[in-house]
Image (cartoon, rainbow, N blue to C red):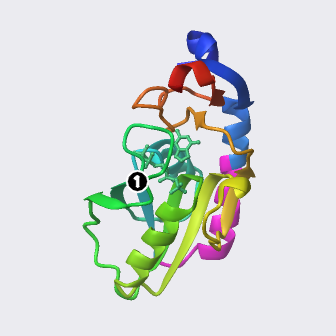
Amino acid sequence: MKAEDVQGDLTEVLFTREEIEAKIAELAAAVDADYRGRDVLLVGVLKGAVMVMADLCRALKGQYPMDWMAVSSYGSGTKSSGVVRILKDLDTDLSGRDVLIVEDIIDSGLTLSWLRANLQSRRAASVEICALLRKPEAAKTAIDVRYVGWDIPNEFVVGYGLDYAEKYRNLDCIATLAPHVYE
Ligand SMILES: O=P(O)(O)OC[C@H]1O[C@H](OP(=O)(O)OP(=O)(O)O)[C@H](O)[C@@H]1O
Ligand SMILES: Nc1nc2[nH]cnc2c(=O)[nH]1
């Protein structure tokens, strides 16, 4: 789906499909430079990170096994509840493994700070984070993020995996959602 297919619902396209592709290539090059040749497990966070994971892992040059977790703190709205629930756990034993969490967005930071602590408690050798988007003004907790695509303003965004009430995930760009859609 393209922006013109849902034009009235969007305020502004922040990043086009081409800009996202270029940014993913940059992130993949940085990850490869740090990790290539090591046995690193990519952990994708469902559902939002599906597009980032799909494109990032294909842009990487090394072998990177992957696994998935589903966690949720947002319910169906635009505000984090702060309570993180595991909806689907990993199949992989993390003890002694280097782990790279792949995420679409860091907003309050509550999901990732909880998730990193959770994975570290499974005795992973290291747990780093790669997130395509981050909202510095929305941070409720400080997180050390190794790879970030873009810092964005504190507005609700959709597309490229990011949803509002399960809609817009299949939009090929990233855009701000018009307030009339969710107010
Ligand atoms: O930094 P935070 O404020 O915690 O927000 C970030 C989280 O919110 C989104 O997931 P969501 O709970 O909406 O689930 P989804 O990935 O299935 O869309 C996103 O994918 C992150 O996991
Ligand atoms: N779709 C979407 N999900 C989020 N989860 C946390 N922040 C956001 C956001 O801006 N958009």
Residue at (58% x, 19% y) in the render: 180
Figure check: 122 above or below 35: below
Tag 1 residue: 73
Q: Quadrant of residue 70?
A: bottom left
Q: Do we see residue 164 in this rendering?
A: yes
Compared with 175, 50 (above or below) is below
For the residue carrying disc 1, how many other residues have a C-alpha within 10 Å: few (<14), some (14-19), or many (20+)? some
The quarter of the rendered structure image containing the C terminus is: top right
The amino acid on which the numbered mark 1 sits, given as a three-letter code, is: Ser
Q: Classify residue 92 as left or right of residue 54.
A: left
Judging from the image, what secondary structure is the residue with disc 1 in? loop
Residue at point 74%, 44% (across, down): 153
The percent position of residue 22, horizontal first and vertical second, equals 73, 43
Q: What percent of the width, then of the height, locates residue 135?
A: 68, 52
Quarter location, residue 92: bottom left
Question: What secondary structure prevails in the magenta region?
Answer: helix
Magenta stretch: includes residue 132: no
Left or right of 143? Residue 183 is: left
Please, which residue is most extreme toward the front here? Answer: 183
For the magenta stretch, what is the residue range? 24-39
Q: Quadrant of residue 174?
A: top right
Q: Residue at x 65, y 30 (%)?
A: 175
What percent of the width, then of the height, locates residue 108? 58, 58
Placement of 146 over or under 108, stated as above or below: below
Q: Nearer the viewer, residue 7 or 15?
A: 7
**Residue sitting at x 39%, y 76%:** 118
Q: Position of residue 115 (x, y in %)?
A: 43, 69
**Quick check: is the Cβ at mark 1 less than 8 Å away from ligand 1?**
yes
